Structures are given as structure tokens and as C-alpha cells.
Amino acid sequence: MVSVGTPVAAELLSPGSCWRLDRHAPGYARPEGSALATEVSAGRRFQVGLHPGHRCGAGRSGTGAADRIPVRLLEDGYPCWLSLQDCLGHARASLAVRPPRPGLPRIRQRMEAVLAQALSAMERPNRYLWGGTVGPDFDCSGLVQNAFASQGIWLPRDAYQQERFCRPIAVRPGVLNLLRPGDLIFFGTAARCTHVGLHLGGGRYLHSSGREHGRDGLGIDGLAPRDHHPVACHYRRELRGAGRVERSHDGTTLP
């Protein structure tokens, strides 16, 4: 058994072993190619070779990149692939522990700080980045996860998972009385949630949106019909509902 704190070595990355990263690293969507699934921030823990659909051991990238290993991130249960080179020299053996899960009173107390964290991201130049969770470049759900994680509140990684995780709150354009600051607002089709924003108050929400229908980065839009900005109009047509964060992820199962 590897002792806690042991620096990582390739031969120690056996299925089931747990490690803590010392620096940020890309979490890839597949064993080859450049597509991101997420970004793994310094201090996060991962377990090797456990998530469904990924074989144990490393995968060879067809693009000439280093071998990759399948992992599950312990804080939110999210699966991705890490480059072996991003781990070597930058991870140490860890126990399979997950962060404390704050209760509802603590979550409510920390909501102002969650909003402040999200708004502070707008102070740096940024662009939309699919898979971005570390900043300054985010995707929509990565921004939301980052803001809550800054206060020790872990949410699932993807927008549709966040929608399932929250307590539903009724909302529609012009009817916003049940919304509170810190609620999540969900957008997409009738079949699936594809986008999420963080409610700031009064129907205004902060989100990271792409180039085709958005701002190519962080921006604030509104649900009120009087907001005629093209981005606000596009997402208002795709409004699915809202949800309230009342728990922190246990890191084991995906919603």
C-alpha cells in the first residue's frame, strides 16, 4: 500500500489508487484528442480507473500526446482522462476522502460569497471555454461549479446534472417572485438542459455563453421581457426553469 504523501510514479497509478494534484490539469473527454471534459484544479483528488466505459490502464493518444489514465474526481464523481505527464511530479498519494458537506444553514450563509466569487471572474479578460472550470475562461456549468466550490459547496459538473441536483423553483419570463440570489437558472430544449446561469437578483443572471448565441465569455442578462438584448432574448426563449442549491455533492454518484 502506498503511503499518504508519496509522490506519484507511473507504476503506482493502479486502479483504485487515490491521488491529490498539486497544480491545475486538463481533464480530457477521451483517451485521445484535445477535447476537454473539465479542468482539474490544484488540490483536487482523483481515483484511478473506476468510472464506467473506461478501461483500466492508460490510453495512447493518436495525436502524439502522452498516455492518459481514466479517473474519477472525488469531489463531484466526475469521470475524465488525465495525462500521465500532468500527474508525474505533480500529484501525491491521498486517502479517498471527500470534502465536508455543509448543511443548508451553512449553504445559505455562504451564498453571498458564492455570488462574489462568480462576479469577480468578470474582472479578468475571458472567453468561453468548453470544459473550463478553473478560469479565467469558463463554460456555463464550470463557472457555477467554481463559484460554489470556492465556498466548499460541491455541485455536479454539467448543467443537466446541476438541474437534477437542485430543488426546482417555478419561474417564467416576467414571473420571478420565487427566485432568490444564488438560484440556478436552466435553459435548453424541452428534452434536455444545455445551459445554466447564476441568478443575481431581479431576474438578472450571470453566465458564460458561447459565440453563436452568446457573448463568448461572461456576461449578465435578464429574464424580464423588457430586456431586449439579443443574448437575453435568445436564452429567454430557451428557459426551462430554475433550481435552488440546498445540499453539497457527496462525490459518489452522478444525478
Image (tube, rainbow, N blue to C red):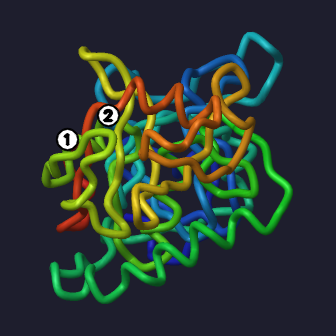
For label 1, the crowd category at 10 Å Cα-Cα, with few meaning under 14, some 14 to 19 and many 20 or more, is some
* Numbered label attached to residue 139: none
Q: Residue furthest top?
A: 62
Q: Can the viewer see residue 31 in this picture?
A: yes
Does residue 60 appear left or right of residue 79 in this picture? right
Task: Say which amino acid is labelled 2.
Answer: Tyr
Q: Which residue is mark 2?
A: 160
Is 179 placed above or below 110 here? above
Residue that numbered label 1 is attached to: 164
Packing grade of label 2 (10 A; few <14, some 14-19, many >=20) is some
Q: As shown in the figure, which amino acid type bears the numbered disc 1?
A: Arg
Picture coordinates of residue 217, whole percent (x, y):
72, 43
What residue is shown at x 29% (from left), y 21% (from top)? 192
Q: Is residue 42 left or right of residue 151?
A: right
Q: Residue at x 41, y 59 (%)?
A: 199
Does 97 sit left or right of 131 as displayed?
Answer: left
Q: State the image coordinates of residue 77 (x, y, percent, origin top left).
A: 32, 48
Mark 1 and 2 residues: CB-CB less than 8 Å, in contact?
yes
Between 131 and 216, which is closer to the camera in this rendering?
A: 216
For the N terminus, give its image quadrant: bottom left
Which quarter of the rendered picture does the C terminus lie within? top left
User: Which residue sits at x=60%, y=37%?
Assistant: 131
Marks 1 and 2 sit apart, C-alpha to C-alpha, by 7 Å
